[in-house]
């Protein structure tokens, strides 16, 4: 049923730290790797080894410049489904293929009954859904539902692939419906925010803002270099330790 | 938004079909149509054929057309589903209307009631079609209060033009139908011009700053896109070709879709019989072509908030 269920207490989602994300795209690559063989398989690619490769990705990493002058920042910005509490992509679905789970808040597509009308991708303000032209169905982030409940993999790996793989630990997974969970505390401490709140979608996923850097101070005066050649300078450095 | 041929054919053809059905039901109740029993059957079948062409065309853009029947299940939440349900349902009173006209004559209570019921169902289907677009909040050119009245008047305009053509072909003077078509055409053009003025003056729904949440740092610019090639999102929702030629296309749509059919309908209102057999069917076809361009622009000029993430203007 594409009507939104009464929201449950549990709201699984991601917290993405824009301060620590280094823009390495590893989360997007591991997402593609896992999901092209799991619940959403296949995530079709066209011309994968030729000119103009194209394909379905459930996670895309943008890079922005924010601000001007000495306070400007380069910010890497992973973009994927936000598993909204009020998901417009679900209510527009004419077949019931698009649905939100009451038990954990995950928004999914049932590819077996999706007719591929693409209306859900128009309804999502964030561009989180991508159409699979080969399979004729819509694809989206599943929050790695086939990992997080998978009893066949070690417990510490029961997290979304993007979270597992992030080398900067910029991605956190947990229950954002529980105010005492680690992710909820992180959001409270760091002032986590919603994307495009004016669209009224109430995203579960939160983004943490880049930290304010201390104002740049005048650079410390470097000591005057001692004279002499490089060997003498090395001896000077060793002796003055 | 990328204008898909099949979806635009759907809104153009089925709009004309349901509009024509609406006028058939209403004008019959007022006893203003030719009384021949075969006229009723032929006219209802033409109207249903137009709407069926549109609906069948719309299944062409589906990834899985064979599953299209599933689309009638979610009428509680989805306007697309409601459109499907009503489109199928409309056939019942419409076919009943034609049969009752043939068997019991056009003036009996059953015929009149079935005709009015078919008219209401047809217009409700058009309203659902409009709401599919009007309910999409990320697209400001669609999520606009003028979209629903615009679509309804457009259906009534093209429907009246088609009915005038059929009446003329049946050998009756189509004065009333042509006059109604002319009035609806003027109303449709006025609404469309107001709509264009509004969307041109409207500020964007969101900015790169709210889309990324980085507005506290300052203005946000795109430094690097996530991918070097196109993808589904850019093809489908960051379509820019139409916007480049929007002004010229608006002029063509106004001329072909509204002004020329309006003048021809006015001629039909004044004249009466023989020349209408050629002129009015031409008007109906020309009107559809013009409205097709207008509907194409409705897609091509629409911008989606998603494009902000790629640094595009919306």
Image (cartoon, helix red, strand yellow):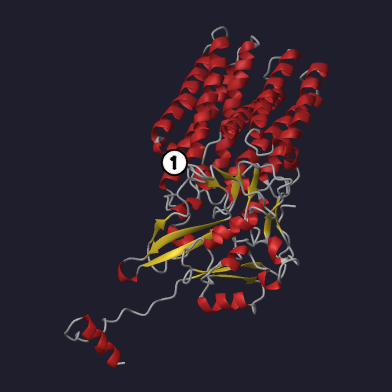
- Whole-percent x, y for residue A174 in the image: 64, 71
Q: Is residue A199 above or below residue A164?
A: above
| Residue wearing tag 1 | B240
Q: How many marks?
A: 1
State the residue in front, A40 or B116: A40
Residue furthest to the top in view is B274
Q: Is residue A167 above or below residue B24?
A: below
The local secondary structure at tag 1 comes to loop
| Residue positioned 63% across, 39% down in the render | B129
Residue furthest to the left in view is A227
Asked where in the image residue B175 lies, by quadrant, the reply is: top right
| Residue positioned 19% across, 86% down in the render | A226
Residue furthest to the front in view is A231
Q: Chain of mark 1?
A: B
- Whole-percent x, y for residue A136 in the image: 65, 41
Residue furthest to the right in view is B103
* Residue B230 seen anywhere in this rendered image of the structure: yes
| Residue positioned 52% across, 24% down in the render | B289
- Whole-percent x, y for residue B130 in the image: 60, 40
User: The C terminus of chain A lies in which quarter of the figure?
Assistant: bottom left
Label 1 crowd (10 A; few <14 / some 14-19 / many >=20): some
* Residue A196 seen anywhere in this rendered image of the structure: no
Q: Is residue B310 above or below residue A237?
A: above
- Whole-percent x, y for residue A239 in the image: 28, 92
């Amino acid at each position: 049923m594409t009507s939104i269920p009464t929201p449950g207490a549990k709201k699984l989602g991601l917290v993405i730290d824009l301060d620590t994300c280094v823009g390495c795209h590893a989360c997007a690559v591991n997402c593609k790797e896992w999901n092209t063989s799991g619940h959403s398989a296949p995530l079709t690619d066209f011309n994968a080894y030729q000119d103009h490769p194209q394909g379905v990705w459930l996670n895309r990493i943008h890079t922005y410049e924010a601000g001007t002058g000495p306070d400007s920042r380069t910010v890497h910005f992973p973009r994927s489904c936000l598993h909204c509490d009020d998901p417009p992509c679900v209510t527009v679905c004419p077949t019931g293929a698009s649905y939100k789970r009451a038990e954990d808040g995950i928004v999914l597509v049932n590819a077996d009954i999706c007719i591929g009308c693409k209306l859900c991708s128009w309804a999502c303000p964030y561009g989180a859904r991508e159409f699979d032209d080969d399979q004729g169905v819509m694809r989206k982030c599943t929050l790695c539902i086939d990992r997080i409940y998978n009893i066949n993999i070690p417990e510490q790996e029961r997290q979304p692939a993007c979270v597992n793989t992030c080398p900067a630990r910029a991605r956190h997974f947990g229950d954002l419906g529980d105010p005492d969970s680690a992710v909820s505390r992180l959001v409270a401490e760091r002032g986590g925010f919603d994307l495009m709140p004016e669209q009224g979608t109430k995203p579960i996923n939160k983004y943490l803002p880049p930290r304010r850097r201390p104002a740049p101070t005048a650079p410390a005066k470097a000591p005057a270099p001692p004279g002499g050649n490089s060997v003498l300078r090395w001896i000077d450095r060793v002796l003055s330790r | 938004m990328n204008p898909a041929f099949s979806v635009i054919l759907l809104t153009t053809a089925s709009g004309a079909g349901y509009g024509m059905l609406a006028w058939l039901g209403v004008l019959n109740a007022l006893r203003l149509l030719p009384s021949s029993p075969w006229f009723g059957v032929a006219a209802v079948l033409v109207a249903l054929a137009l709407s069926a062409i549109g609906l069948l065309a719309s299944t062409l853009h589906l990834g899985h057309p064979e599953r299209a029947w599933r689309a009638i299940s979610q009428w509680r939440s989805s306007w697309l589903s409601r459109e499907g349900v009503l489109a199928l349902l409309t056939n019942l009173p419409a076919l009943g209307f034609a049969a009752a006209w043939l068997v019991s004559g056009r003036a009996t209570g059953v015929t009149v009631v079935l005709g009015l019921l078919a008219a209401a169902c047809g217009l409700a289907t058009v309203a659902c079609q409009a709401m599919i677009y009007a309910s999409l909040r990320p697209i400001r050119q669609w999520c606009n209060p003028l979209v629903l009245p615009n679509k309804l008047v457009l259906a009534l305009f093209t429907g009246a033009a088609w009915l005038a053509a059929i009446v003329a072909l049946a050998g009756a003077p189509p004065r009333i139908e042509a006059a109604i078509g002319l009035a609806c055409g003027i109303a449709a053009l006025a609404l469309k011009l107001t709509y264009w003025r509004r969307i041109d003056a409207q500020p964007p729904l969101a900015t790169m700053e709210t889309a990324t949440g980085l507005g506290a740092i300052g203005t946000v610019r795109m430094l690097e896109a996530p991918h070097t090639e196109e993808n589904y999102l850019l093809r489908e929702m960051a379509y820019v070709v139409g916007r480049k030629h929007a002004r010229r296309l608006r002029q063509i749509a106004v001329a072909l879709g509204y002004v020329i059919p309006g003048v021809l309908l006015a001629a039909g209102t004044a004249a009466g019989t023989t020349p209408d057999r050629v002129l009015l069917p031409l008007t109906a076809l020309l009107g559809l072509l013009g409205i097709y361009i207008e509907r194409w622009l409705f897609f091509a000029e629409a911008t989606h908030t998603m494009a902000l993430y790629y640094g595009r203007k919306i």
